[in-house]
Structures are given as C-alpha cells and as structure tokens.
Image (cartoon, rainbow, N blue to C red):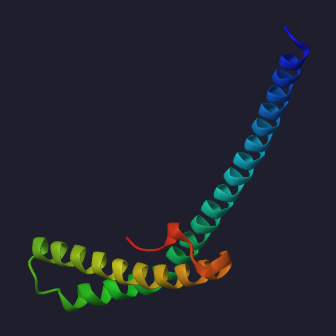
Amino acid sequence: MPVEELEAKIAISTSNSRWRSSSRKTRSSAEGSGRETRERVEDEAMDFAGSQSASMSAAVLEFMERSRSLPRLKMAAASDRFVAERVREAFEAWRAEFERRAAGRVPGGHHPGLSGT
C-alpha cells in the first residue's frame, strides 16, 4: 500500500475519532440539559399541585354543600365534572405563567417544547 494512501486512511481515522468524541460530548451535554429541564418542570408542577390543594378542597366542599339535594349518583357525576373543570382551569393558568417564565430563560424567548398543544 502506498504511503499516501496510508496517510489518507490515518487522517480519515483521526477525523472520525474526533467527530465521535465531539458527538459523545454534545449528546452528553444535551442529555444533561434535558434532565435538568425535566427536573425543573417536575419540581414546578409539584409546587403547583401543592399550592392548589387547600383552595381545591374548599371549592369541592362548597360545591358539595350546594349540591346536597342531588341524588347520590348525580352528585358524584356533577362533582367529577366540577373537579375536572377546576383542575383544567387552574392548570391552564399555571401553564401559561410557566411558559412565560420558561421563555424568558431561553435565548430568543422561545422554547418549542413548551408552547402550543
């Protein structure tokens, strides 16, 4: 095999090694960033849920008091709808605020994974 061909193969092999190393570093960095983002979202979601429990409990008790005259099955169905709607409203308000804050932390003010449904 000519020397030039060996040198070319060595150069290609060296280049490939550098690319693989760079690729591993980039992937590792992205995985760390993704893990950090996921943990931040989970922490904030847990904080949100905890902050809603007292007001949600009070609203449900008030609803049940107002609905005492309903038959048991109708009250159960109505309370399920009431709770689902209250949770959806509270979550949508929290989500809008969370996305606004998250967009402020991302260069360019946009984070594609946090907007739209």
Residue 11 percent location from the top left of the image: 85, 29
Foreground residue, 48 or 53?
Answer: 48
Horizontal arrangement in the rendering, residue 21 relative to residue 63 (left or right): right
- Report the number of discs: 0
- Looking at the rendered image, the quarter that the C terminus falls into is bottom left
Q: Is residue 49 above or below residue 70?
A: above
Q: Going 44% across and 87% down the picture, which residue do you hit? A: 55
Foreground residue, 7 or 108?
Answer: 7
Q: Is residue 72 above or below residue 4?
A: below
Q: Residue furthest top?
A: 1
Residue 69 percent location from the top left of the image: 11, 87
Q: Quadrant of residue 23?
A: top right
Residue 19 percent location from the top left of the image: 77, 39
Q: Going 11% across and 70% down the picture, which residue do you hit? A: 73
Q: Going 66% across and 56% down the picture, which residue do you hit? A: 35
Horizontal arrangement in the rendering, residue 92 relative to residue 25 (left or right): left
Q: Going 60% across and 77% down the picture, which residue do you hit? A: 102
Foreground residue, 42 or 19?
Answer: 19
Q: Residue furthest left?
A: 71
Horizontal arrangement in the rendering, residue 41 relative to residue 89 (left or right): right
Q: Quadrant of residue 22?
A: top right
- Looking at the rendered image, the quarter that the N terminus falls into is top right
Q: Is residue 30 above or below residue 43?
A: above
Residue 49 percent location from the top left of the image: 50, 74
